[in-house]
Image (cartoon, rainbow, N blue to C red):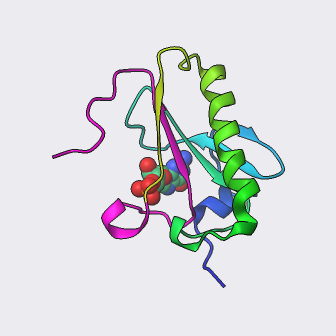
């Protein structure tokens, strides 16, 4: 059984976070340390530690991450100019919180995809 992270507490509203969207499958909140004018973290409500842990049973919730991202981007007013979705996996991917999440970043040109 995977260990819960701070993100499970955010989903259950046991610790404060600026939640911008929540439904039966996913929760989205503003990143505490934003890297762009809009920086939102979108997470499954169930704990999947990393992309390396996903199974076919997770396909519905993983799809919901994208439909939520699209909806939130429009609500944030960044859809027309565009944005970037990032999912980091483990150490080389730079993952810090082991509860799978999608970063939604926008509000300015984001530059190259990967730092050299
Ligand atoms: P990772 O590096 O794992 O892909 O991204 C984790 C993200 O979660 C980071 O951008 C970090 O700033 C954010 N984060 C970590 N702890 C908290 C928290 O307690 N509240 C919020 N709102 N964001 C957090």
Decide whether residue 106 is among the magenta residues.
yes
Q: Residue at x 34, y 69 (%)?
A: 91
Front residue (pair 10, 42)? 42
In this image, 104 relative to 45: left or right?
Answer: left
Which range is magenta? 89-116
| Coordinates of residue 88 in the picture (x, y in percent) | 43, 57
Front residue (pair 87, 1)? 87
Front residue (pair 55, 94)? 55
Q: Residue at x 62, y 45 (%)?
A: 17
| Coordinates of residue 94 in the picture (x, y in percent) | 35, 60
| Residue at the bottom extreme, as displayed | 1
In this image, 40 relative to 111: left or right?
Answer: right
Q: Residue at x 33, y 29 (%)?
A: 110
Secondary structure, magenta segment, majority class: loop
Task: Tell me if I can see residue 13 in this picture.
Answer: no
Position of residue 43 relative to residue 99, above or below, is above
Q: Residue at x 67, y 61 (%)?
A: 9
Task: Tell me if I can see residue 18 in this picture.
Answer: yes
Total labels drawn? 0
In this image, 104 relative to 110: left or right?
Answer: right
Q: Quadrant of residue 49?
A: bottom right
Q: Quadrant of the N terminus?
A: bottom right
Decide whether residue 6 is among the magenta residues.
no
């Amino acid at each position: 059984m995977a260990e819960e992270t701070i993100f499970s507490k955010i989903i259950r509203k046991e610790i404060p976070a600026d939640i911008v969207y929540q439904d039966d499958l996913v929760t989205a909140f503003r990143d505490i340390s934003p890297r762009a004018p809009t920086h939102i973290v979108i997470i499954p409500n169930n704990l999947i530690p990393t992309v390396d842990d996903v199974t076919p049973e997770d396909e519905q919730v993983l799809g919901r991450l994208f439909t939520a991202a699209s909806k939130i981007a429009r609500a944030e007013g960044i859809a027309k100019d565009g944005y970037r979705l990032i999912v980091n996996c483990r150490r080389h991917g730079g993952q810090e919180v082991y509860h799978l999440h999608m970063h939604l970043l926008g509000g300015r040109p984001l530059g190259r995809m990967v730092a050299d």
